[in-house]
Image (spheres, grey):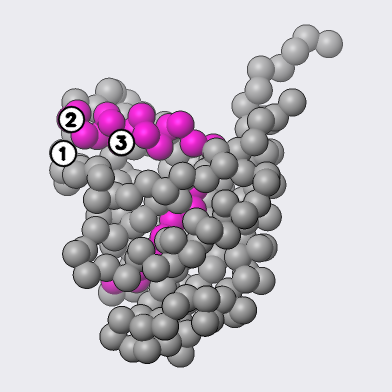
C-alpha cells in the first residue's frame, strides 16, 4: 500500500524584500488542509548553496560541497514538490535554477506543481521551469497557480498590500486542480518505484 506522499513547498526566492512569503504561506495552508499529502516548507534562505561548481552532476559523481550534499539529502526525502516561482526577466530566479542544478538523482521521477507570481502570473517562468524539469526527469502537473495582473497588484506591497485571501476566490479552482494532479502523479510514481513481487 502506498503511503501518503511527502511534498516539499520550495520557496524559490531569497531576496530580503521578496514577495514569495505571502503566496508560500497561503499555498502551505491550502496543502495542509488536505488529508492526502504531508507538506513541509523548504526555504532556499536556509540553504546557502554556492553557484554550481562541482566537477559534474551528482548523476555522474558525488558532490563535494557540504551545502550541496545537505540540499540533496533535504529534497531527497520528498515524493513531490510545489515551487513558489517569481518571474525575473521571463524566467525563474537564479537561486532557484542553481538549486535545481545542485541535485539530479533526487529529482528523478517525481512530480511537481507551482504557484507563480508576476505581471503575467509567472506563466513564462513556470514554462521555463517545466523545460528544466524535463531534463531532471520530473513530471509536471498540467495546472499551476498564477497570481498576476490586478490580483498581484491588489496583494503586493507595492500595490494594495491586501491579504491574499482577498483574491483567493480566483486562485482556489486552479489550486485544487494543481494539488489533485500532484497527488495523483505522486502516488503513481511512488507505486511505480515499489519493488515488483514475483507472480
**Which residue is at 32% across, 50% downward?**
43
| Residue 141 x %, y % | 60, 56
N-terminal of the two: label 2 or label 1?
A: 1
Is 184 situated above or below 149?
above
Query: Label 2 belongs to which residue?
Result: 65
Query: Within 10 Å of the Cα at label 3, are there few (<14), some (14-19), or many (20+) other Cα atoms?
Result: many
Q: Could you tell me which quadrant the N terminus lies in? A: top right
The residues tagged by marks 1 and 3 sit, at their Cα atoms, a distance apart of 14 Å
Q: Secondary structure at mark 3?
A: helix
Q: Could you tell me which quadrant the C terminus lies in? A: top right
Query: Label 1 belongs to which residue?
Result: 53
The residues tagged by marks 3 and 2 sit, at their Cα atoms, a distance apart of 10 Å
| Residue 155 x %, y % | 41, 81
Q: Nearer the viewer, residue 66 or 22?
A: 22
Q: Is residue 67 left or right of residue 195?
A: left
Q: Which picture quadrant has residue 5?
A: top right
**Which residue is at 31% across, 81% downward?**
157
Please tell me the numbered disc located at residue 71.
3
**Which residue is at 57% across, 51% downward?**
32
Q: Are marks 2 and 1 in contact (CB under 8 Å)?
A: yes
Q: For the magenta stretch, what is the residue range?
A: 65-88
Q: Nearer the viewer, residue 160 or 13?
A: 160
Which of discs 1 and 3 lies nearer the camera? The answer is: 3
Q: Which picture quadrant has residue 124?
A: bottom left
Which of discs 2 and 1 lies nearer the camera? The answer is: 2
Amino acid at each position: 500500500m502506498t503511503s501518503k506522499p511527502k511534498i516539499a513547498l520550495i520557496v524559490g526566492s531569497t531576496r530580503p524584500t521578496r514577495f514569495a512569503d505571502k503566496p508560500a504561506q497561503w499555498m502551505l495552508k491550502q496543502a495542509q488542509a488536505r488529508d492526502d499529502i504531508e507538506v513541509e516548507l523548504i526555504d532556499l534562505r536556509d540553504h546557502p548553496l554556492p553557484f554550481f561548481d562541482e566537477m559534474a552532476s551528482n548523476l555522474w559523481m558525488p558532490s563535494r560541497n557540504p551545502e550541496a550534499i545537505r540540499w540533496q539529502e533535504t529534497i531527497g526525502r520528498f515524493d513531490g514538490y510545489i515551487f513558489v516561482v517569481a518571474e525575473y526577466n521571463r524566467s525563474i530566479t537564479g537561486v532557484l535554477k542553481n538549486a535545481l542544478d545542485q541535485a539530479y538523482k533526487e529529482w528523478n521521477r517525481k512530480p511537481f506543481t507551482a504557484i507563480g507570481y508576476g505581471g503575467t502570473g509567472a506563466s513564462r517562468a513556470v514554462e521555463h521551469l517545466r523545460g528544466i524539469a524535463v531534463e531532471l526527469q520530473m513530471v509536471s502537473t498540467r495546472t499551476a497557480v498564477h497570481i498576476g495582473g490586478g490580483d498581484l497588484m491588489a496583494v503586493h506591497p507595492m500595490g494594495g498590500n491586501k491579504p491574499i485571501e482577498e483574491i483567493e476566490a480566483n486562485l482556489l479552482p486552479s489550486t485544487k486542480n494543481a494539488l489533485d494532479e500532484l497527488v495523483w502523479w505522486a502516488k503513481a510514481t511512488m507505486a511505480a518505484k515499489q519493488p515488483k513481487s514475483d507472480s
